[in-house]
Amino acid sequence: MEGEKAVVALLLQALVTGLLMGGVYAAYSSGFSLIFGVMNIVNIFHGELIMIGAFTTYWLFTLYHVDPFLTLPVSILSASLLGYVIQRFLINRVVEAPPMMSYLCTFGIHLILANLALLAWSADFRTVTTSYSGEGFSVGPITVPLARLATFGIAIVTTFAIYWFLEKNRHGKAIRAASQDKEMARLVGIDIRKVYALTFALGAGITGMAGGLISTYFVIYPQMGLPYTITAFCVVVLGGMGYIPGALVGGLLLGIIQSLTATYLTSGLSVAITFILLFIILILKPQGIMGRGAVE
Amino acid sequence: MLLLLFPLLKPQGYYFRMFSMMFLWMGLSSAWNITSGFAGYIDFGAVAYFGIGNYATALLMTKAGLPFTSSVLISGILSSFIAMFIGRYTMRLRGAYFGIATLAFAEAVKQIVFEFDRTFKVTLFEGSHGITLPIVHDDRFFYYIFLGILFFIVLTAFLIDRNKFGYALKAIKEAEGSAELAGVNTRRYKVASYALSASLIGILGGVNAYWLTYISPLDVFSVIHTIHMIVMALFGGIGTVFGPVLGACVISLANELIGAKLLYTYLLMLGAILLVVVLFLPRGVIGLISMKRSRR
Amino acid sequence: MTMISALLLPGIARGQTAKFRIGCALPLTGVFGRDGNLVKDAYAYWADTINAKGGITIKGKNYPVELLFFDDKSDQAESAKLVERLATFEKVDLILGGFGSDSVFAASAITEKYKYPMVSGGASSNKLFERGFKYYFSTLGKATEEVRGCVEIADMLNPRPKTAAIIGSDVLFTSLAAEGYKSYLKKLNIELVYSELFPLSLDDYNSLLFKVKQKNPDMLLVGSHLVVALKVMKALKEVDFMPKMVAFSYGPTVPDFIKSLGKDAEYVIAAAEWAPNLKYKDAVFGTARQLNEAYFKKYGRYPDYVEVASIGGALTEQWAIEKLGLVPPLKEADRVRIMEELYKMDVMTVYGRIKFGPDGANVEHPPIAVQVQNGKLVTVFPKDAAEKPVWYPAKAWKERKQ
């Protein structure tokens, strides 16, 4: 490839890669933002929900040869159910307590879930490889992997779906009301406990779905949760905690910045960038890039 | 007293190692407790200072040829300066955000140590190769050092608990807003406690490097160390003087006896302990003991 | 009180039948859990094989072998602590090496201190041999040497590769492998067009590999463990890039690799130090081929070269004991003699020739290269050890029939 064309191609490819990665980030971070926005809970076992979704897909594929995209609903269900149960019996107890308690609680649940998974499935690294894994199409010199495009698409659809749900749907509005003013919501007859349960189940379900998708192009393992949780933090803080479209914005932003750093500097720095960025945003603009996030 | 005389029994090196490890953890969790327990700012990035202490001492001893004691002291001072800088910004945040910011900071430092040499084309931190310190064959030496430092830390905690500094911290923990209104310079006290914790953790880190004789970024900057500090202090009784010491003693012993064979079960147990404490025993074992006492 | 007696009890209830007690600290859990368990299986296989004949025979009497495994959780501080426990508290007769350069690095400092000769088959970083230690031995060659086969194979390829790129994870073993690649590329006059090390925690390799794709090297050389190898292959397919040859320093020889990737693993080359078709044999295990089959019978899988290297290591300690006619329990003076004997050794085993150089590394063990062909590992280098000709160049992704 001639010099100039190559430079442009590399840039475009980096942008595309970043955008698609951003879609992946948004997919697995929106649930986190939702839960925080409504319940004010920083869910440290968020990554484990991704892990559960990923392993659900993996085992169904490996044991029963069911296509990973077909098993997405099962991933959604398993994560959703887990989230609901944990919320009802554990989180509910600390939701009114000082925030410190809730994140220590979710942290403890993280340790338990991750290590139960380790005991059950061993630390082996696994991945889902179908006949069409890694397939993509080319637009000129740019390659676009399909699975990631699918995730990107799903992220956008999900973001808008949740947004619509919270704005227009009756139950969604109840959730929003509860997050804005608990007492008022109660007075109007909204059952806060049901709201929380629904929110958590929904947030967990979306996250589980993302996990299922991830198992097709990443390597999964039982302790994968924590790094994903940390990235989800970063994405959501960037875009604004509790602000649903923010997860999309934050994800895309992070994805592109990482991609550009990896392409023009080194991959190692792209990892460091994530934390440096998070740190800077927290210091300078904790409400996120768009200023719509909640701050404690 | 007993502990001072113990070495006269000429036990095997293994026991020295085991006790040294216990003293190290008792010291670390007590130091962590000063900021997180007394002032209520739960620090999720404490391992950063542990790692900084390890590396500072390692580098000073190997590259600058400084003797052990000076290296460790400088490591402590360095840690406190860094903490003063970081704390100045992070302590503007509350609760979960402070936790995330400190976690991001710790992860960023880890990545920086990995990437530094390669990025700036120098040979300083040695990245993944790690640093080897001069070998010391004297386990008894470390036994006394760790014991001595532990004593110093607990004494410090004890004194803080009783004097004005401690009162200010506790006021910050209980009701920061009111404390500010009452004219307390909360920022100065917060940052001071953070710097103090950091310097003590840094000192312990320095001794650790010499004790292990080989350090690498993955080990000394690992988040599991912070996890241990948190669980140990919580279990024993966060915010008390002897709570962390007790918690660390029990948990590090458990680690030694169970952890060798059953790592995942051990971590599971940590998670369960965390949950139990958060849900039922927020004041830890010490709290339980004092509750029983006051019932008489 | 009760805790202390619990710690002391093992010391009392011991020593009815005279046997050789051999200890080992391995990563049975954690990042290297898989690999650690492979080595454990290997040592267990060795012990079972000789115990079936009664154990180690000294002057007509049989002494069975008892193995003591501790889990170092892939943590080096833990490894050091456990090895110290084995030496001082458990007072084992001998110590065998674990897995993972970092952990073995820390553990060997302890064995050096307590004068326990330690032979390992699971660590190869050069730094291990640069400390002037007398008690550390390795049946594996040095990391920078192990990858030699992956580069020297270029002379067998037609058309000869002109360019190469090196990537690798930033941990001790793999970064050394990368350095090894570099020095051999230079020797063979192949141009290095790109080189980068990345953190082990990196999830997305696409950006990195798009960069490499643009440079279009003939060979892609990767410093890897299993997880990195898996990630690289998945990413190569996503970015639609398949260089004419891709080689890994470690990963493809672990059965999980082929199992997880299926057809996508074809053409991959890996560095190795042993293969079942090599003409190695010894009195205990027979030929390499026989060991391979017997292993499959017992464990349902073929051994990875690290496992055989570990068995080789155990054999050297065994033969040293037999030659010197030592009986358990061994004293420090006995172990010093074993150490000296190990330096004199020059033997052929089912793992191949073992001769320890003055720094403890195995100097007579030529690295080989294997390739995944039709779902199986086939030796392709050096020529006199090759089972089949190497497949080159690798077919591009879109051209492969799925």
Image (spheres, helix red, strand yellow):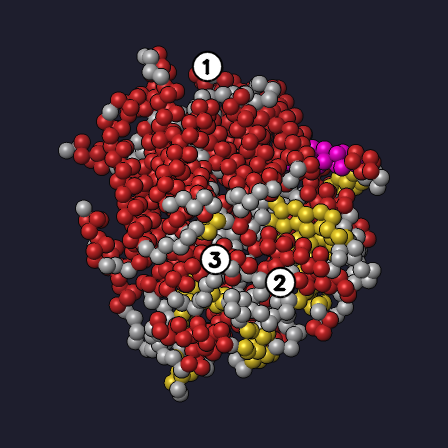
Q: Residues within 10 Å of mark 1 (few under 14, many from 20)?
A: few
Q: Chain of mark 1?
A: A
Give the magenta-colored segment's residue range.
A9-24
The residue carrying mark 3 is: C105
Q: Which mark is residue C57?
A: none
The residue carrying mark 1 is: A184
**The residue positioned farthest toward the front in the image shown:** B65
Residue C144 image-quadrant placement: bottom right
- Residue A186 % position (x, y): 45, 18
Q: Which mark is residue C146?
A: 2
- Residue C74 % position (x, y): 48, 54
Query: Which SS does the magenta portion mostly show?
Result: helix
Give the residue type at disc 1.
Met
The structure residue drawn at horizontal position 38% and vertical position 85%, both measured from the top left corner, is: C61
A193 left or right of A234 in image:
left
B181 left or right of B6 in image:
right
The structure residue drawn at horizontal position 72% and vertical position 74%, both measured from the top left corner, is: C384
Residue under disc 3 on the same chain as residue under disc 2: yes
Distance (Cα) linking label 3 and label 2: 18 Å
The structure residue drawn at horizontal position 19% and vertical position 49%, both measured from the top left corner, is: B2
Please state which of residues A188 and C15 is positioned toward the viewer in this rendering: C15
Give the residue type at disc 3.
Phe
